[in-house]
Structures are given as structure tokens and as C-alpha cells.
């Protein structure tokens, strides 16, 4: 075979750990093994019917052509109304970008803005993609560890210390994947005070889980709490998680015109536009009946409570409850150093995850993939029975350690 050398941007990054974990589960299942899969990063529900019907209607009406780079008028209006409801800000169409998922928008935003040497502040534990997306686009991720003592959240002091003249972006993700942590208005205000002093720093707020919030009222966005930052904040959201539409691949961003224009210029060369059918479905999701969102949050909450209770009863594990999203971030310090029935030592969270998969057929993801160890991420975007079976199997497997 001819020698092929991928680009440096590819060799310096890793494939997504969560995508890899999901692929491994599929492989084991194809081999006939029964796996309790707690790696899932997507709702187990089907897309609501009225959303699917909107897609069918769009096809029937011949809405099967390219659209403008930043979306159909229907989708633009739906996004503008949705953002006005949630943030109090009425964005103009020239401030909107759409893409094949929030993921693709974040990637393109970094591609559109980073030059070699530009720094991006990424908080650990982080969504696995952020550091690699920065690296792939010639930037330098500046990882700020936000441990359990600070609720896995960035403090004003830590932010102040991380900012340099090279800082281009701060990436915030609330509710957080993997910890479920949510910033309240006071916390956002104190981060805002630091950011106001450093006018060269832009903020990318990834709010993809904002509907999946277990607290009172509506979650507050940085741009609502600190409106002065709206002219340097790119708000990223989408329909994947709130409406169980991960496969439709539709996300959106809203922010300052120069930032959005640079993203849309790249999108015009990368994709032209996301699927017109998915755009019609997303418009229906954002403007239609929201009962699905409310109902699914109730279901997630019940699963979360069962899992938190069960995991905290397992000697060696502890976890705080998630304020949003559908993951638990489990501290496994108490298990490190123990010995398996086969005589192997659990040296780190990666060993623990392998042990759980091999001895208990439970799949979770090691904290080290998210930049903080020793932890593991457990998803509760799966049936209550699976959550219960998983927690029981984890407890049994850990009881066998010496
Ligand atoms: N941000 C975070 C924090 C996520 O967890 C995910 C999905 N795993 C995304 C963005 C991407 O979502 P989308 O399906 O819209 O690309």
C-alpha cells in the first residue's frame, strides 16, 4: 500500500474517548456479550413525533435543497425566539450560525479564530473534545483543574491566574459534561467581573444541556447575567440533547457579528449548510410543544436520584448529585490500590473501568479521559432498570476487591 502520512493536526490529537467507548460496547455486543452500557452520551428516548412529522412535511413540500449558510428563515426565527425567551437577548440573523451539531460549530469557531500560539482556557474535567479541537486548530489548550473542592467549577481567582495576553477564548460548559455542575448567577457574575477587566478574552458558552436542569426555575446564561459580555460571547446550543435529536445533527451558535461572519465564511466552504430536513425538524422542536422536555427531565431526575443513592452506598465510591445534564461524576479514590480476584492491582481509573467491563460487563468511562483522575463518568441517559442493574453490578464487582 502507498505510504500515507496524515496531517500534523491529525497526529497530534486523539479520537474521541466517548465515541471510542460507545464503539467498544457495540463490538462486545456484536460478539454476543450482554453489556450494561452506562457510557451513552445521548437520550435513550426517540425523537418526539411532531418533530419527525415536520421533517416528513418538509420533504413532501420539496424543501430538499441547499439553504443559506446560516439557515432557513423558519429556523432562524425559531432560534431567535428561543434565545430571546431564554436569555432576554434578541439576536439578529447576522448573529446566527448553524452547523451539523453543536460539536461542528465549536470546531469551526476555533478554526475561524485561532492562530498558532493562541490560548484557549479549558476547565478540567472537560468534555473530551475541547482540548483536541483546540490542538487540531493550532491553538494551545490551557487546562485549569477545577476539583471537587470548588464543585468542579471555575473560580474568579483561578480564571484571573489563567488569563495571559495570548488568551483568545474561555470555554464554559454549564450544565457540564461530565460533572453535571451548573453555574449560578452569582458565580457567573464573579467570573464576569474578571472577564470585564480582560477585554481581549472571548467566551464560548456551550449550553447544549441547558434544558436538562434539575434546579428551580430556568438556568441562567452568562449573557443574561453579564450583558456587557454579549459582544464577545459565542453561545452554542442545539437540539441533540433536549429533544433527543442526536442523529439529526443540528446545532446553532449566536454571538458577535465578526465572530459569526468568520464562522459562516468557513461553513460556506465546509458544508454549505446542514441538512434542510434537519433544519425543518429543529425549527419544529424549538417552536412546538415543550412537554417532551419537561417529561424527560422528570425521568432523568428519578434515575439520577436512584444512581446517586446507590453509588454512595458502595464502599470506595462517592459522588455528588448532578445539577444538570445526564451524567454522574464518580470519585473512585477509595478503590485505587486494591487487588482484583485475579491478583491485578487497580492502579488508576482506567484499570477500574477495564475491571468493571471485564468482570461485571458494565461500561463506564475513565475520568482521566476528561482530564481529572481518579473518577469515572456514568451516564443515566438509559432506562431506570439499566441504571439500577449497573449500580448493583458495580457494587458487587467492587465488593470482590481486596
Ligand atoms: N458539547 C457537549 C458538552 C457535549 O457533551 C456534546 C455531545 N456529547 C456536544 C457539545 C455536541 O452536541 P451535538 O450533538 O449538538 O454536536
Image (cartoon, rainbow, N blue to C red):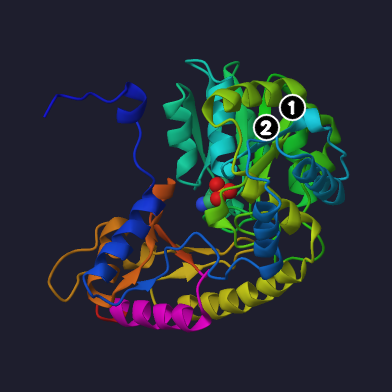
Give whichever of 151, 178 is nearer the camera: 178
Give the Cα distance between marks 2 and 1: 6 Å
Residue 382 belongs to the span the image colors magenta: yes
Q: Quadrant of residue 13?
A: top left
Q: Give the percent coordinates (x, y) of residue 149.
A: 56, 54
Picture disc at residue 232: 1
Picture disc at residue 203: 2
Characterize the local packing of mark 1: few (<14), some (14-19) or many (20 or more) Cα atoms within 10 angstroms: many
Q: Earlier in the sequence, mark 2 or mark 1?
A: 2
Give whichever of 350, 237 is nearer the camera: 237
Callout 2 touching callout 1 (CB < 8 Å): yes
Q: Residue at x 39, y 83 (%)?
A: 392
Q: Residue at x 53, y 36 (%)?
A: 122
Picture disc at residue 55: none
Local SS, label 2: strand
* Magenta stretch, residue numbers: 380-398
Residue 185 vertical placement versus 296 (above, below): above
Q: Give the percent coordinates (x, y) of residue 238.
A: 65, 49
Amino acid at each position: 500500500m502507498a505510504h500515507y502520512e496524515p496531517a500534523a493536526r491529525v497526529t497530534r490529537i486523539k479520537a474521541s474517548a466517548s465515541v471510542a467507548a460507545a464503539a467498544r460496547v457495540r463490538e462486545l455486543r456484536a460478539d454476543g456479550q450482554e453489556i450494561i452500557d452506562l457510557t451513552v452520551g445521548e437520550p435513550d428516548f426517540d425523537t418526539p413525533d411532531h418533530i419527525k412529522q415536520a421533517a416528513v412535511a418538509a420533504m413532501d413540500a420539496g424543501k430538499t435543497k441547499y439553504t443559506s449558510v446560516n439557515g432557513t428563515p423558519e429556523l432562524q426565527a425559531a432560534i431567535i425566539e428561543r434565545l430571546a425567551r431564554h436569555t432576554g437577548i434578541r439576536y439578529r440573523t447576522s448573529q446566527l450560525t448553524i452547523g451539523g451539531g453543536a460539536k461542528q460549530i465549536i470546531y469551526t469557531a476555533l478554526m475561524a479564530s485561532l492562530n498558532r500560539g493562541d490560548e484557549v482556557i479549558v476547565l478540567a474535567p472537560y468534555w473530551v473534545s475541547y482540548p483536541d479541537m483546540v490542538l487540531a486548530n493550532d491553538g494551545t489548550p490551557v487546562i485549569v483543574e477545577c476539583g471537587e473542592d470548588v464543585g468542579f467549577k471555575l473560580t474568579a481567582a483561578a480564571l484571573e491566574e489563567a488569563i495571559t495576553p495570548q488568551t483568545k477564548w474561555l470555554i464554559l460548559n454549564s450544565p457540564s459534561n461530565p460533572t453535571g455542575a451548573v453555574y449560578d448567577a452569582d458565580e457567573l457574575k464573579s467570573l464576569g467581573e474578571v472577564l470585564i477587566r480582560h477585554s481581549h478574552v472571548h467566551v464560548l458558552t456551550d449550553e447544549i444541556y441547558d434544558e436538562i436542569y434539575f434546579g428551580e426555575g430556568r438556568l441562567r446564561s452568562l449573557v443574561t447575567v453579564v450583558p456587557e459580555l454579549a459582544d464577545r460571547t459565542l453561545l452554542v446550543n442545539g437540539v441533540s440533547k433536549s429533544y433527543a435529536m442526536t442523529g439529526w445533527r443540528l446545532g446553532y451558535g449566536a454571538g458577535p457579528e465578526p465572530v459569526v461572519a468568520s464562522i459562516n465564511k468557513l461553513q460556506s466552504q465546509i458544508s454549505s449548510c446542514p441538512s434542510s430536513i434537519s433544519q425543518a425538524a429543529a425549527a419544529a422542536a424549538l417552536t412546538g410543544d415543550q412537554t417532551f422536555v419537561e417529561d424527560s427531565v422528570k425521568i432523568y431526575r428519578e434515575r439520577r436520584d436512584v444512581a446517586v443513592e446507590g453509588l454512595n452506598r458502595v464502599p470506595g465510591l462517592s459522588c455528588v448529585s448532578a445539577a444538570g445534564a445526564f451524567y454522574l461524576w464518580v470519585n473512585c479514590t477509595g478503590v485505587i490500590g486494591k487487588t482484583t480476584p485475579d491478583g491485578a492491582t487497580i492502579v488508576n481509573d482506567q484499570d477500574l473501568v477495564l475491571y468493571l467491563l471485564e468482570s461485571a460487563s458494565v461500561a463506564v468511562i475513565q475520568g482521566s479521559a476528561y482530564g481529572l483522575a481518579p473518577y469515572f463518568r456514568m451516564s443515566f441517559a438509559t432506562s431506570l432498570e439499566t441504571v439500577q442493574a449497573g449500580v448493583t453490578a458495580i457494587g458487587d464487582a467492587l465488593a470482590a476487591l481486596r
